[in-house]
Amino acid sequence: MKKLFSLHPIFNAKKDVRFLLSWKFIPLVIFFASIHLPSRSYADDNKGNNKIVHSKTPGFSITNLAPADISDIRVTGIVRDEKGNPMVGVSVLVQGQTAGVSTDNNGAYSLSVQPDAQLRFSFVGYKTVTVAVSGRTHIDVTLTPDASSLDAVVVTALGIKREERSLGYSVAQVSGEELTEVNHENVLTGLSGKVPGVAISSTGGAGSSVSMVIRGTTSLNGDNQPLFVVDGTPIANTLNNVGGFGDRNPVDYGNAISDLNPEDIASVTILKGPSAAALYGSRAGNGVVLITTKDGKKSKGLGISITSSTVFDRPYKYLPLLTSQFGPGERPYTPDNHPTNSLPGNPLVINTGSSAWVGPELDKGYNAVQWNSPLDANGDPVAIPLVSYPDNSKNFMRTGITSTNGIAVANANDKGSYRLSYTNMSNRGILPNTDLYRNALNLATSYRLTKNFTIDADINFVRNNSNNRPAGSRGTNPMDALSYLNPSVNIMDLRDYWMPGQEGVQQKSIAPGDFDNPWFLAYEAINSFSRNRGYGNIKATWQITPEFSVMARYGLDMYSEHRETHIAKSQSRNPNGVFGIDEIFHSERNSDVLATYNKRLSDWDFNVSAGGNIMYQRGTDFQNSTNSGGLVVPGLYNFSNVLPSSLVFSNYSFQKAIYSVYGLASVGYKNMAYVDLTARNDWSSTLPVENRSYFYPSASVSILLNQVLQMPSYVNLFKIRAGAAQVGKDTNPYSLSPVTQNGGAWGDETSLIIPGTLLNPQLKPEIATSYEYGADLAFLNNRLRLKGTIYRSDNKNQILPINLPQSSGYGAKLINAGLVRSEGVELMLGLTPTAASSKLQWDVNINFSKNKTIIEELTEGMDHFVLWKEAKGGAWTYVGQAIGDIYDRKLVTVDDKSSKYYGYPILDEDGSWQDYGGGLTDAVKIGNFNPKFSMGLQTSLSYKGFTLTASFDWRNGGDFISQTYRYTESDLHSQRFLDNTIKYFGPQANLPQYLMDNADKYIKGIHVVGGPTLALGGFEHTEGGITLHDGVFNPGVIEETDADGNFIGYKENLGGPDTKYIRYQDNYPWSFTKAALFDASFIKLREVSLSYAIPNSLSQRIGLQHAVVSVFSRDIILWTKAKIGIDPERAFQPSGTGFEHGVEFNNTLPWVLPIGIKLSLNF
């Protein structure tokens, strides 16, 4: 025995016998099958130092199989982990046989065996334990983690836990600890850069909308958000997140995923492709995000955990405008050279009502009459020093503060468990008078009514509310008003924002009716909301036999939201004030049943499940507001203060249902090959009767080549996988037949109208067919890890609107058309440079993703699809081209290649650029809003209780349109536009040739030569009898014609004698999108955290089990290629039906440097 097994008996006749067994020639299981230990024995298989500990008998015996005449006995017990927590799903097998059971939700098992049988306890990620029964009827076992195991467990569709090695498709899982190492107000922002193939964008700020797109845009209907499932309950992430009343008052109230409390999340699993998500049916066309919340099942007695964090958001980088050069006005007049006026002494007068910033220069010692000039004894304004106030933005902003405090109580025993948590989050925004509050209550319970019947319940209540959400875009957005506040104005002079004696009636403004006071908008354009949300489920599980179980679940997601808008009188777009209320209600009920049968036969594992689901949604939206008539009495926000003629009402409601049946079968062979098959059929109420039933299957295979073939010992895993699947996607309610709407009064009658889109009673579901191939590799005891996936998804039968002739009475018609193909690659590299035994632990994970989506087909007569139109251009895609292409109006140029002016702009007779109009056929592609590729890097370094983690995110390529720069540069607010003008200080006669020698750089395209002053390259220009050096010209040529209008040649506009000069203020290329197009590349330090775990020996002295303190920061912008002070990630606009990617509009909050501190205590 000693020679064969390297068995070293160490025994004491009065105590125990211990056998230390080192793995050599034969598996340990054979040895177990040969040794009979009478009682109270346990084993610990840690692969490197296997031990058998035997109490009572100081000896051993070699035995054969148990005699057939010995009666079976029933053995029961509980399997726990190293912390004493019950373990669910542990496999309990009779050694040498295929019979066995799995532990239930309380870690309990029960089976009949021979008295001298051996029981084998195994669970992925844990060391296998084999125990001799020795006639006992109750055996409890403790399993310990196996650090070298590759059998990670992930949550898959329907909440089924699977070994990752058995999956034939790509699944990404992020733990709750990873999400909350650095506090985020939104769970999705914590995923940025951590998962390949997942793009996350946010408008910025706490509570704002967050867009998540998996593997690129695949649906043309505007909604590419995945399905979110929390503990088995689908959560509505509806996109009616932008609202507001009044003119230009769009408010982002945040989409529903922002209601989830990150502190309650145990893990997030992302099912990327249809192969992974097919079991969720028509709602899974864009992927599925499975969120598992924390429970108390792992508690060892009563446990209390407390978390507290505070984050300070300090603004540090503001939009780079002309902060100190020019005052408001169209021309840079001086005290000695300006238009005459009737004021005594003819002083220089500043045109404060001008949106342009090319007026008199600041800080030159000039005195001028300004908006706040005092009056002399005759009531005439007095000229005062014209100086700059470069810190207006800094003085308007404040340091934001976010505090999050939570407490959780958990307990568990052999009958059940619970976890009750409460979290409070309060946010003070960096904009004055903005805030956000969240109160979240979570209860997770489990109770074993009988040994085979368990009830689980997860209940969540979340309240989000704000006293004021700032408007976005233009209009009532304080940031928009701030961007139009010339630096000659001290913003602190506007801090008391009411005119004296006119409080509540007239704001203090530099130009009443034209410009709003930023302070006034911050405190008197109020958009408040409160959203109460309850979601969760109750689940019953009946383990009928060790192999067969039935689960029934009822889930509910319900929220009600109250939005209210108050805008005081004198706001420039809403001078009579605004009052509006919006009441929103949404609910979704899901009833599920799932039967599961598991069986192991020799080398085969079988898992078969079948079930069904009934989903029912309903929602209402009721709005009541004022029109332009506004309020009767200023400041009284009540509908009794609104004239009946000024009231506007609207009401909307919907219902939707989907019935579903589904099944799945998984087969495994010798832990080396796995095949999964799924099928689902949905019946949707939103589709016509003949098309509402649709079926979609999936299949995937996983093969562990390192188990099939003989490979070197350093190869721990070599898995290849492949999958194919189909999923369907229905449409919105009421897309089949028109519904009449109230069109208002027509004389004494009430008119009815129908929508402008002709609906289609023959709609079919969208169908997405995907193929996925990949490999997972691990080497050197899992210290080197590689994963790769390539995929293709074909989405056909897109539900699209197509234009109709006006004679039809409709503007468009809904049809099924098109084929959208998405292809991409995802790579992951994991490194653990340090050994497991080292005190220093270092992990590095790198991910890479690249995706391209092409419209392969549309329909007859339709060669393109428009995603959005902005800035005289837009994003639309032609058949055969990539989604995300951005187009611009085409510049009129010389197209005769034989001409020496080939490629030069052809200017009009005034010297301005010309385009071919706004037609799509004359547009030119200028970019694409999708990145060329994305990469993420996460690293963790631990040493003696200290842990340093960091996460980086790099998005390379892609473009975006900045409406902020387009509007501000058109009024000459931007330093960039001034810097980009061509400045020539040489002899005037040499200028044309200088430009022609550098035609590609200075002529072809859109360029401006000159500047606003002589020192800045301006040319002499006379207007209104005043001559200044604010002339510029556009290099190009002007067509010459004869008396009959026939073309006879070109005249140069290159700075020569016939050049057409234009004043600097009038020469922004407003008609061309490219002037505001920027590269979207960036690198961000998503997260950085330094934590310290207080030693247990110290923390336990004060009654603590565990204590961690950390400091952190997040979302630090390290580099942007555009260098314009705007975060490219905010270049998307939430809308009522989706998100417009690739365009930003006043998403110009300053960049902030967050500094946070967090304390976690466990009692």
Image: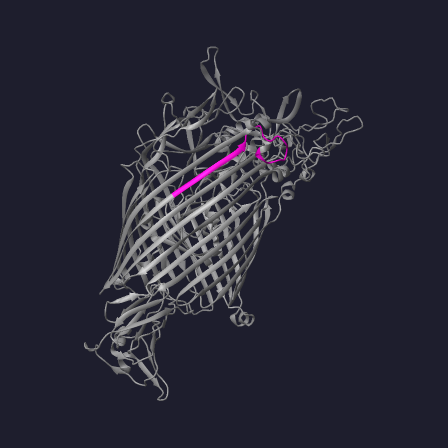
Count up the numbered dots. Answer: 0
How far from the left and from the top, in percent, is residue 916? 44, 24
Percent of width and height locating residue 312? 59, 52
- Is residue 148 found left or right of 1012 in the rendered image? left
**Relative to 6, residue 396 above or below:** above
Left or right of 638 in this view: 287: left
Q: Which residues are magenta?
A: 617-639
Please report the residue visible at 67 percent of the width from the left and 22 percent of the height from the top.
1026
Residue 622 lies in the magenta stretch? yes
Residue 369, how many percent across, how many down?
72, 29
Q: Is residue 1073 left or right of residue 578?
A: left
Residue sitting farthest toward the top? 1044
Q: Look at 47% across and 63% down and name the residue there.
A: 410
Question: Is residue 485 rendered magenta in the image?
Answer: no
Q: Is residue 1000 visible?
A: no
Q: Which scheme is used to colour this image of the protein? A: one colour
